[in-house]
Every structure is written in C-alpha cells, then in structure tokens.
Image (cartoon, grey):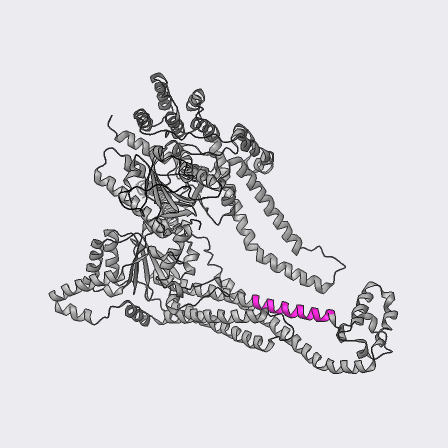
Amino acid sequence: MVLNVRKKQIEAVERMLHFHAQPGSQGRLSAGGGLGSNGQTTPEEEAYKVLILDAFTKDLLAPLLKVSELRRHGVTMHLQLHQDRQPIADAPAIYFVQATAENIQRIVADGAQGLYDVLHLNFVHSISRQLMEQLAGGLVKTDAAQRIAKVHDMYLSFSTLEAGLFCLNLPEAYRHINEPTASEAQIEAVISDVVDGLFSTLASQSIVPIIRCPKAGAAQHLRSHDHILVLFDRNFELSVMLQHPWTYKPLVHDVLGLALNKVTVEAPEPAGAASTVLKPPPKRQTFEVGEADFFWEASGAKPFPDVVTDLDQSIAKYKQAIEDLNRRTGADVDPNADPNELMQANTRGLMSAVASLPELTERKRTIDKHTAMLTKLLDCIKNRGLDKLYSLEDSAIQGKCDLPGILSVIQGSKGTSADKLRLAIIYILTVDQLPGQADADRMQQLLEAAGADLSAWTYALRMRRMNLMGRSQGVAPVASSSASSLEGLGGFGSVSGWADKAFGQGLSSITKGVKTLLGGEQLTAVTLALDTIMEGRALPENDPFMTFDPKAAPGRAGRGSGPAREAIVFMIGGGNYIEYDSLQAWAQRSQPAKSIVYGSTDLPTGEIFVKQLADLGRLTPR
Amino acid sequence: MPPFGGQSIRDKTTEFRAIAERLRKEQGAAGPSGAVLHGAQPLGSGATQNGAFSQQSEAARKAARIGQGIHSTSQKLHKLAQLAKRTSKFDDPAQEINELSTLVKQDIQTLNVAIADLQSLSARTTDGNKQSISHSHTVVDNLRTRLKDTTKDFKDVLTKRTEVLKSNQDRRNLFSIRPDEGPSWQRPSSSQPQRQEQPLFGEAAFKGNMQSRGDDDAGPSSSERTPFLSQSSQQQQLQLMQPQDSYLTSRAEALHNVESTITELGGIFQQLAHMVQEQGELTVRIDENVEETLANVDSAQAQLLKYLNSISSNRWLIMKVFFVMLAFLVFFIVFIA
C-alpha cells in the first residue's frame, strides 16, 4: 500500500456528499455517461443538494474538488455559511463546517428560519459534547430539530495538496509556538489544533504509526507498524525555510506565492498606459497547478533551466501534434486511392481529430500557463538576482561559506531587503564559528543600509548564540555527487532557441552563473534524519530520536523495528516545497522505494517566514 | 480497508437525537403546548427523510424522475452496447438491436422533452430569490449534461454497430462476390449464364479475383476456369443464393436504419451541446468566485472614483457656464434695459 492522503480525503468527502450512504449501494450521478460504470443508484442519491462551507472548509475543498466535480455528485451550489443565504425549497443541505460556537449559532438560525428542508451536518474534525448540547438546545427551542437528518464527525481537518503533501492551514504556527510572551493556554490551543489535524490525518489513513521525534522542542509535547510518524520541530532546521529555491515547484511557491495549489500572477502592464490619477488595478491571472497538470508533475522537481528546456520540448511536441492533425485531415489526397475508402478514411480522421481537439486545447492551456509563470519567474530571477542568492546559500548550507560574496550581495543593488536578510540569517545559522563582533556589526550595518528589518536578524543571532537552533548535530549535510551535476549540463544547449524568443535576451547570461548548480539535489537535514530513522541505522544508545509506540504497553518505550517502508513526516511550525522535494527525491532514490508523506502546519514562503522571525524578535525582551 | 476509509468518520446522529429528545422533554415539562406539537412529528432519520421526499415540490419530483429515466436509459444502452459488440456473423441479433435502439431513441426524445418541460416549469415559478432560481437552473443544466453524455454514448454504440456491420460485409465480400460487385472481367464474358460465374465460397473465384487485380491480360484465361464447377453444384448454389439475397437486403436495411438514427441523434446531440455550451465551468475552483467578487468590488470602486472625478469636473463646468450667463444677464439688465 502506498500512502496517498489525497485520495483518501477525496473518498471521504465524496462519501459525505452522498449522505454517507452505505458503501454497498454507493452510486454516483455519473455524468461520464457510465456505460458499465454506473452502479445501482437509489432515488435518494439522485437528489440535488446544496453544500454549505465555512472559510476553513472552503480552503480545504478548493484544491480537492472542482465545481464540475461537485456537480457530478449532485451539488448544485456551494455557499458560504456566513453569507446571506436565501431559502431553497426541496433541496437538502449538506453542511461541512468547523465546530465552533459561532458556526453552531448560525446553523441553529438556519434551522429556525427553515432555509432548507433537511440538514446534514458534517463537522470537519469533531463536535464536542458541549457544542452538541448547544446545537440541540437551539434547534429544539426553535422547533427545528427534526430537520437535522444526520450528524457526523469527519476528522478531515487537513488539506491535501498532492498525494504526499498535506498541511493543516494553521498560519504562523512557528511564531505562535515560539512566542516568548504567549501564555500557557495560548500555546496549548495551538498544540491542540496541531494534534487535531495530525490525528485527522492518521485517522483518515486508518493507520497507527510508531512515533519518532527529536528529544527537544515542541515536538516532544505531542504524545499521542509499518508506519512511522516522524515529528520535527521547525527549530530542528531553520535555514531551509529561508533559502532561495532553484527548482521549479519551490520557485513557484517562494517567488510567486503558490497557495492551495493556486498561483496568482500579475499580468505585465502595458507600457506607457499609466494614467495620471486613476490606475486600474493590475490584471491578475490565476493559475491552478496540481496532479492534473502534466507539465507540473513532470518538471516540478527540476532546476529552472531544465524546466525551460522542458517547456521548449513540450511546445515542439504540441506543434508536432497539430501538424499531425492537419495532415490526417488535410487535403493531400492520394489520386490512386479508392474514393470510397478515401472518404471513409477521411471521415474517420476527422472524427478522431474532433475527439482529440479538447485534449490538445487542454495541453495548449497548460503550456500557456507555464509560459506565463516562467516568464514571471525569469523577471524575478533577473531583478532579484535569485541565482546568485541560491548559489551562495547553497554553499553556505553545505558548509563552504563565502563571506565576501555574501557581503557583496548584501551591498549590491539587486534583490529586496528581505532577500538580503534571508541570506544573512542563513549565514548566521549555518556558519561553523560565529563571526566576531566586528564582522557581525559590519553585516548589521550593511543590512540596515539595505533597509532590512533588523529584528529578525537579531533574533536569529541571539538564538544562535544560545545554541537553541541552527545546525542539528550529527547529521552533516552531504554534498551532492559531482557526477549528477555533470550529467545535468548535457541538455543545456537547447535552451537558447525558444527561450530567447520568449524571454528575450538575458537567459543565457543568467543561467551561465548557475551552470554548476544544475542537478545539485539538496539533501536537507530532515531528509538525512529520516534516512537514519528509516534505515534503522542509529544505535539504540545514541539514538537522538525518541520512540513512542502506541501499540506497545504504556510506560515502556518500544524500539523501532528496523527499516520501514512508509513514513509520515510532520513539521511543526511550517514546511516548504524544498523539503518536500528533497524527501520525495530521496524516497524514490532509495532501494527499495519508500513512500513518504510530508505535512506541516502551514507552508509559508521565505518572506513570510522572515516576517515571523521578525515578529518574534520584536516580542523577545532584550 | 473499506473503500471510503470509513472508520475515520463517526456518526453522531444518535447522540444528537438523544440530546434533542432529553432537551425536548425538559422543555415539554415547562410548556405542554410545545410537547404536543413535537410529539406529532416522528423523529427517526428514515422517517424524516421520507417525509422530506414526500414534501418535495413538483419540480424536484420531475427532476428526480428525469434522473431515473436517464439512469434506466443508460442501463439499456449498456445492454445495447454488449449486443452491438457481438461480431459473430451467424447469430446477429439484428431484431433485438433494432428494437432496443428504437426504445432508447424514444427514451432520449421523451427525456429531452421532459427537460424542456422542467425548464419552463422552473422558469414559471419565479417566486423570488436568486439562489433558488440558480439552484433549479443548475439542476436543469446538470440533467441536460447527463442526457447529452448518454446521447453521445448512444451515438458511439451505433457507430460501433455500423462498423461491425460494415466489417462483416467486407469480410463477406472478400470471400464471395455479389452480382453487382463482380470483377469487371466477368461482365463481358456473356457466353455463360451470370450465376454460373459466381461461386459462393469457391476458391477459384477468389484466386481469379486476385489474379484479375494482378494483370488484366489474365482475364480471358481465368474466365475459362469457371466451368470447372459441375452443373449440379451450380444448381445447389442457386438454391443457396436465394436466402442469402434476402439476408443481404435485410443487412443493408439494418445498416440504413442505424445510419439514419445516427443522423437524427446528431441533431439532438448538437442541440444539447449548444445549450450546454455556456456551462463551461469544467475547471472552476470552489474559491474562484470569492476572489472574483473581490476583484469586482475593486473595479467597482475604481469606477466610482472615476465617476466622482467626472462629476466634480462637470460641476465646475456647470458653475463656469452659470457664472458666464449671470455675467451676461447682469450686462444686459444694466446696460441694455
């Protein structure tokens, strides 16, 4: 069994949309015109219904199901719980909401108003006894209790972005957990949210894993056989959160702000159209990426120049397909052919052409989307000098620090202040010997001159001095093999043609600087730690990870039982795509192949994470 | 593992009902009139649902019926597809297929009418709110999409059937020669009766056929081969030929039928496709409209600002004009009058 959080979640949601009908009689309103695929459909399931969501579940469902898929399951409308809603006669309503007092009040009000005939309540995690009393009380008082058909706890409070990636949508968790001024209750609340989400994930997978976690930090608070759940605190390694990425998915996430599988790119403004007083809001394009996107899946983990090459190839392939199509339906008639046969062949060709058109337009749309995204990325790389930043940070993380280079970049004109700050903090976090007071002061001055918010810097510096975070001991990052980086150089020549046309000049000058980075696959500290755990390499006496086995007798810590095949890695305090990619690459490379699910409280971009650090810096008493 | 990962979902309906029941009793003690009211309504989930379904309005009932109709049609279609897939030449279920496809065709037509009916019904009951209207619109659209898909399947099945028929015919042509399609070299050799030249499964003819394609000069020589067949065997063939002929005509008829059905279906299909076209929401995300709303609000604000600007400049213009006119008025009154 391969772990697939996404599939499981979609299944659970679909079940909810069919009123939790028994699996035996489950049939779909199959719009796909089920020849054969259509099972027994009871009249009850033929009902058309409305779906009521709150903000949290809207975010949860958005990457999972499209509107058309909802339609297929008989949902005619999806409405916000706290919107003004109007009564809809003869339609049952499915509520999929969080169990909060506010939501409960609203549901009771809906029942009292009689907006819908039948209400099916589904709570995204679970409803407490107290809230249940409140719900029942309110409904009985308004004489609407009989409208409630079913009440379910869904245990689904996590949002899955890919088969092996989920997040709990708990923003700024890192800040909340590490806040020095937070009260015990606040931290408890955050932790219990995390526990709820994590429990949901495990419950929906129906697995009971062995829990491993490092011996310090917030992860230890989460006490809760084939599977391993590895818990990390974000302080285990911070630098990866700040690092500038060079592969496609992380770039889109970090630079373009990928969130819930959705990217919003501002279209380039037409030059010279700047009106004096009123500037129209910039036109935004929203793209969706995900499993359905063939290019995203194929090239997501490749470095930027390779992605450009891939796109080039995709365009060539698309053109080839169009040509084929034209040829098949075209006018070049063989004069010797039997006219009857010819007509038949032509008709058939036309039919297949018509059949393949939607697929081709879809492909065209995908290619256009990625062209727009890559163009925007290239702009950013050029303007912010991301290639230089990446190479400096990468070498710093690998222990080959280049202080003069870093200083010159901080002094330089390229890059935002946040970029420079990130570079400086990575330097502080990864350098073996803390720089002397003079060096630190100089760096601070340069940062100040660049207009950076210094609280994040001082926070990182202080944390490093207190040795609370930074490089985890014992797992030194391993430099990628030089063989693979040489291999990566092979396909480099063909970038030029299309790329120059599409992106104008300058690609080659940019990529020149990072040629050496091609194929440089990063092994993050988390990956290395996971390697140790899953291969069962650590000796029992110096195992830095604690083990909790829920199946073992209480009070006695069990030992991990050798190599495991499947693991859920959970990062408390935020994760990002660099780590995810690194884990997936490692899982595929290892023999036998492993199945890794990566999750975290949220997926902040580097910039947002720096802001969290800055907030922490301000809150920490000096 | 259950297909839905079912263990993770917990049904709390009974708990809810228990609490509601208890609270009702408490409330009932306080006010007896309420208790009577509550008591009249049965609680079990099944009863509630049945009640709900019996309360459904006409439109909903119609929609459900159409949905069921589409479902049963697609089941018939499934059967038809299985029949049509049979390529065997000897037990061709032509009769059955014809009946079934007429049935399906009628079904689709009635469903089409029913959907149009439903649409006009929901259009008539414009009792008010937008969400209710959009709900019924979506229901109609959804039904239409499903019917369109079913029609498409039907068309595919029929196309498949035509192909099977055609390939059967081709195969037959390969091994036998029909009167109207005989090789050209046989026509001029009128010295022999026509039937004699057409052995049904004769290898000779097959060979001759091949040869005649090879080179035309071989024609006369190969035509002499036909007399190899003895007179008696020719008689037999003649008898064999008779039912074969009627069989062929029935095949041709079947083919025509199927083809005409496809054309008709093409009409319906196109009509539906046209109507469904606007429903191009294949890739719309759930959170899309929220952001659209936001963008719309932004642009609305921009428009308002623009309007404000134009208004204020207009105001200035009006003032100026007014001042000029006033000045003229004063001028006229003072100097002319």
Q: Residue at x 51, y 38 (%)?
A: A302
Q: In this view, does A276 lie above or below A60?
A: above
Q: Quadrant of residue B213?
A: bottom right
Q: In which quarter of the image is residue B123?
A: bottom left
Residue A105 locus on image (x, y percent): 23, 55
> Viewed as shown, does residue A489 lie left or right of A617?
right
Q: Choose between A573 and A550: the one closer to the eye.
A: A550
Q: In this view, does A19 lie above or below A478?
A: below
Q: Is the magenta stretch mostly helix, strand or loop?
A: helix
Q: In this view, does A9 lie above or below B317?
A: below
Q: Choose between B147 and B234: the one closer to the eye.
A: B234
> Viewed as shown, does residue A212 lie left or right of A484?
left
Range drawn in magenta:
B156-174
Q: Is residue B142 above or below residue A505?
A: below
Q: Which residue is drawn at 36% across and 32% down?
A: A238
Q: In which quarter of the image is residue B214?
A: bottom right
Q: Choose between A452 and A597: the one closer to the eye.
A: A597
Q: Which residue lies furthest to the top in this view?
A: A438
Residue A305 locus on image (x, y percent): 53, 35
Q: Can residue B215 be seen in this view?
A: yes
Would residue A183 be counted in the magenta stretch? no
Of the 4 image quadrants, the one containing the C terminus of chain A is: top left
Residue A619 locus on image (x, y percent): 26, 31
> Viewed as shown, does residue A313 lie left or right of A563?
right
Would residue B169 be counted in the magenta stretch? yes
